[in-house]
Image (cartoon, helix red, strand yellow):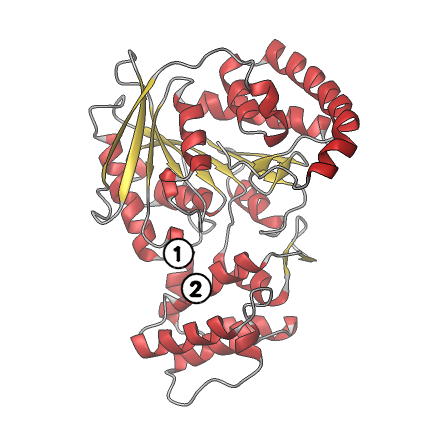
């Protein structure tokens, strides 16, 4: 259900720590799987083990998975994009699951990590569809992304390959937020059975704060510092630039973004003033993306036109969360390098009767991580996988 992280680089590191790590991981694995297999179904645990980078050696000893067939074709949401559907052989019309990957994943469903996750889920009894959505691979989340997802969701719900009439959704990172948006949308909420999300964001304006200031709302609502990575800043900037009207305005903002070094992509907005001729909305975003003063950001955001506020709200799942009337199972890391700690909590607090949240130190953003200090967190993550499995079917 989640992306796999690359193994630590360097043979010297592996040799130096192999024995110590093996003892710690082996003890954690034994305790975790013993408790998990007693109280949980085996299927969800196999998905967790297969998606944990530190347990790939153990995954080889799991039972041989069932055979799958894969069908590939243009998506209903955008014929220029493609999607892949994995279906267990010999299981007529299994429950349908639409998997939404995160942003900036090269290849989408063709990416070996995403394809592997889809296969892992399909092998425990689901028909899993992964559509490539417009903008996501380029690091842009926009209105066309949401519209395409809604069309893809309706296609899957009415497909003869899955059990009717409703399907579940799984979303990773930004994909979790997009899944929630689709579950809230009037056109598609009737066909959504449940949502499982790994580290979604709640409000796009919070991500603007993270990208520009390196801080956002923590678990208590007070600002907390985030060691945000450069790609998060790029995604936020590209997404807000895509909402700006006028090709010339978007070109000027994109050029400023390109001038920034890889480690500091917003520097181009801070080192020079906005060029003459920019329309007011473009000039406002230039000021916001170049701002480094926390006290100034709320005023800059309030000054944006009402149309922009509607665009930001349409890409934020929190406003519609109280209207959800389906099971929503979320997981988020205790400490994150992408989203503020208050994002998933805000979604859970918006509708506590329907939204269940697991916060664990066994997640590295959206990837399971097993280490000497995260045994309890890994067991919590196992319980999350079991709850997710229950609501998917």
Q: Position of residue 385 (x, y in %)?
A: 54, 25
- Residue at coordinates 72% horizontally, 26% vertically from top-left? 375
Q: Position of residue 114 (x, y in %)?
A: 43, 36
Q: Which mark is residue 66?
A: none
- Residue at coordinates 21% horizontally, 42% vertically from top-left? 76
Q: Is residue 245 above or below residue 76?
A: below
Camera-side mark, 1 or 2 = 1
Q: Is residue 213 above or below residue 16?
A: below
Quarter where residue 382 is shown: top right
In front here: 63 or 335?
63
Q: Is residue 361 visible?
A: yes
State the residue position of label 1: 138
Residue that sits furthest to the bottom in the current view: 276
Q: Is residue 372 visible?
A: no
In front here: 160 or 327?
160
Badge 1 or badge 2: first in the primary sequence: 1
In front here: 384 or 104?
104
- Residue at coordinates 43% horizontally, 75% vertically from top-left? 255
Q: Are marks 1 and 2 in contact (CB under 8 Å)?
A: yes
- Neighbour class for label 1 at 10 Å: few (<14), some, many (≥20)? some
State the residue position of label 2: 238
322 relative position to 16: left or right = left
């Amino acid at each position: 259900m989640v992306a796999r992280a690359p193994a630590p680089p360097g043979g010297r590191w592996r040799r130096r720590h192999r024995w110590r790590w093996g003892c710690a991981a082996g003890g954690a694995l034994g305790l975790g799987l013993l408790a998990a297999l007693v109280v949980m179904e085996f299927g969800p645990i196999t998905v967790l083990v297969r998606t944990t980078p530190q347990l790939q050696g153990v995954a080889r000893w799991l039972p041989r998975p069932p055979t799958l067939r894969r069908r590939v074709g243009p998506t209903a949401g955008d014929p220029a994009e493609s999607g892949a559907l994995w279906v267990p052989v010999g299981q007529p019309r299994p429950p349908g699951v639409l998997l939404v990957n995160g942003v900036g994943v090269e290849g989408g469903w063709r990416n070996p990590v995403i394809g592997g996750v889809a296969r892992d889920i399909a092998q425990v009894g689901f028909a899993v569809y992964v559509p490539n959505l417009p903008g996501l691979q380029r690091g842009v989340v926009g209105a066309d992304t949401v519209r395409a997802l809604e069309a893809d969701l309706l296609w899957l719900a009415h497909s003869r390959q899955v059990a009717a009439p409703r399907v579940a959704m799984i979303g990773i990172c930004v994909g979790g937020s997009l899944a929630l948006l689709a579950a809230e949308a009037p056109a598609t909420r009737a066909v959504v059975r449940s949502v499982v999300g790994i580290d979604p964001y709640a409000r796009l304006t919070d991500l603007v704060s993270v990208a520009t200031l390196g801080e956002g709302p923590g678990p208590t609502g007070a600002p907390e510092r985030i060691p945000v990575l450069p790609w998060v800043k790029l995604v936020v900037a590209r997404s807000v630039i895509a909402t700006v009207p006028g090709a010339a305005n978007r070109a000027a903002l994109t050029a400023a973004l390109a001038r920034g070094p890889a480690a500091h992509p917003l520097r181009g907005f801070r080192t020079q003033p906005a060029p003459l001729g920019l329309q007011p909305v473009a000039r406002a975003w230039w000021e916001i993306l170049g701002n480094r003063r926390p006290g100034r950001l709320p005023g800059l955001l309030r000054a944006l036109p009402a149309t922009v506020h509607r665009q930001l709200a349409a890409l934020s799942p929190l406003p519609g969360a109280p209207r959800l009337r389906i099971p929503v199972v979320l997981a988020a890391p205790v400490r994150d390098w992408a989203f503020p700690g208050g994002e998933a909590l805000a979604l859970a607090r918006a509708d506590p009767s329907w939204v269940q949240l697991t916060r664990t130190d066994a997640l590295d953003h959206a990837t399971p991580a097993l280490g000497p200090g995260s045994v309890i967190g890994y067991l919590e993550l196992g319980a999350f996988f079991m709850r997710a499995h229950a609501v998917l079917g």
